[in-house]
């Protein structure tokens, strides 16, 4: 039992504020940026760069949970988070987030380089101000914008090694950017009821299931050729090209099933959104394996 | 130590347990940061 007068937290509540599951994809894509960039970075500094990316992403998660505490409280998926559950005070979470955000940028700037620190600061500002505060609750294209925030890590990793931003990290940015809508809208399809209740204008809420499924297919059709660009440019070899092509066909099949899910005339799934659940899972594995293939290709090529 | 006001003995014990956990985590984070900054300093001094 907790006394209501004392908001009291466990260590795991402070870890939960950092959204560790989101962080894992961010850390991974940041490491890929570091690995595929030409040049060398001392392992201690490379570790520091990845740590700063991870902490900054966690800080964004904490600030996001502070800002979204009202909608988190009404969504089944999020109402047990530390702030809506009353274990951490909102102001404490905000202070925690700001401290980690500022700290990660300063350490990146002092230990690694100013370009990486600058892009890191830009990505935090974009996520917090443009996505969370401005667009998330205003437009059904919110996820497209949020995808831009999540697409920064490979650029930051690349900048940590080279001190600059080139065409290749921008392409990796674009891949994550285009990947995010089909990934997240698959989730939004089966979490539709939650978002509707919270009043978040997710695409299935405002445009319906049919339109969402159509958009998922369009973005995936754009994504697959885009993933082959590093090969066209001669940045990677056939290992990556084959992996990208095979994974891409798999993703297309997966979203094709989403589009042809049995549904009623309003676009609500009659299969409990089984294809959308499968596509969501596939999309995560897709990005992990695609980027791992790029790193492996670069290391053997 | 006296219990904080409006807490029973069990509540106070649970409170102290969580507080101890947070203290240990804080120590680990600070010790880790000190080690990291030391390592960064050494690398920067020897490679530049």
Image (spheres, coloured by chain):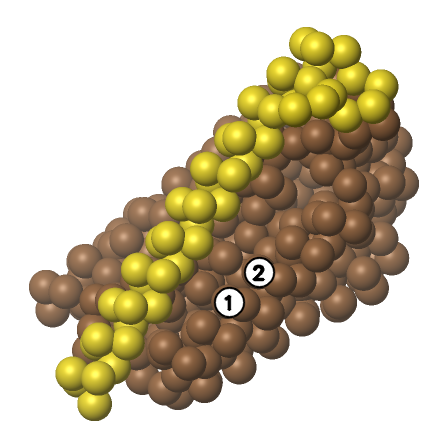
Chain colours: A brown, B yellow
At which x and y percent is residue B28?
Answer: 40, 45
Q: Residues within 10 Å of mark 2 (few under 14, many from 20)?
A: many
Q: Residue at x 72, y 37 (%)?
A: A88
* Residue A158: quarter of image: bottom left
Q: Residue at x 70, y 30 (%)?
A: A8
- Residue A104's disc is 1
Placement of A157 over or under A296, stated as above or below: below
At which x and y percent is residue A94?
Answer: 73, 54
Placement of A11 over or under A92, stated as above or below: above
Q: Residue furthest left?
A: A300
Discs 2, 1 touching: Cβ within 8 Å: yes
> B36 or A20, which is in the foreground?
B36
Q: Is residue A131 visible?
A: yes
* Residue A100: quarter of image: bottom right
Q: Chain of mark 1?
A: A
- In this rendering, would B8 be left or right of A33? right
At which x and y percent is residue A60?
Answer: 63, 57
Placement of A264 over or under A249, stated as above or below: above
Picture quarter with the C terminus of chain A: bottom left
- Residue B2's disc is none
Q: Element under label 1?
A: helix
Q: Residue at x 10, y 64 (%)?
A: A300
Q: Residue at x 43, y 54 (%)?
A: B30
At which x and y percent is residue B1?
Answer: 65, 24
Q: Chain of mark 2?
A: A
- In this rendering, would B24 be left or right of A288? right
- Residue A100's disc is 2
Q: Is residue A176 visible?
A: no
Q: Are marks 2 and 1 on the same chain?
A: yes
Question: Alpha carbon of mark 2 to alpha carbon of mark 1: how far?
Answer: 6 Å
Q: Residues within 10 Å of mark 1 (few under 14, many from 20)?
A: many
């Amino acid at each position: 039992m907790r006394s209501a007068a004392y908001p009291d937290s466990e260590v795991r509540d402070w870890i939960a504020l950092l959204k560790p599951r989101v962080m894992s994809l961010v850390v991974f894509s940041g490491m890929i940026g570091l690995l595929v960039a030409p040049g060398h970075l001392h392992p201690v500094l490379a570790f520091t760069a990845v740590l700063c990316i991870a902490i900054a992403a966690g800080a964004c998660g904490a600030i996001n949970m502070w800002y979204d505490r009202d909608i988190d409280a009404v969504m089944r998926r999020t109402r047990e988070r530390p702030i809506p559950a009353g274990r951490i005070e909102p102001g404490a979470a905000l202070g925690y987030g700001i401290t980690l955000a500022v700290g990660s940028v300063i350490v990146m700037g002092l230990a690694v380089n100013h370009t990486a620190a600058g892009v890191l600061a830009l990505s935090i500002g974009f996520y917090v101000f443009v996505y969370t505060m401005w667009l998330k609750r205003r437009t059904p294209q919110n996820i497209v914008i949020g995808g831009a925030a999540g697409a920064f890590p490979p650029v930051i990793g690349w900048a940590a090694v080279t001190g600059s931003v080139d065409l290749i990290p921008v392409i990796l940015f674009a891949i994550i950017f285009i990947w995010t809508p089909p990934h997240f809208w698959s989730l939004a399809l089966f979490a539709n009821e939650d978002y509707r209740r919270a009043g978040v204008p997710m695409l299935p809420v405002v445009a319906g299931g049919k339109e969402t499924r159509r958009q998922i297919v369009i973005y995936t059709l754009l994504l697959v050729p885009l993933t082959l660009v590093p090969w066209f440019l001669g940045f990677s070899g056939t290992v990556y090209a084959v992996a990208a092509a095979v994974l891409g066909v798999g993703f297309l099949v997966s979203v094709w099933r989403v589009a042809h899910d049995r549904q009623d005339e309003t676009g609500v799934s009659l299969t409990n959104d089984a294809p959308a659940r499968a596509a969501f899972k596939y999309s995560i594995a897709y990005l992990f394996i695609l980027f791992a293939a790029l790193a492996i290709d670069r290391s053997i090529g | 130590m006296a219990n904080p006001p409006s807490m029973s003995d069990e509540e106070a014990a649970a409170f102290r347990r969580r507080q101890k956990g947070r203290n240990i985590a804080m120590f680990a984070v600070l010790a880790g940061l000190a080690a990291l900054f030391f390592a960064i300093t050494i690398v920067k001094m020897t490679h530049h």
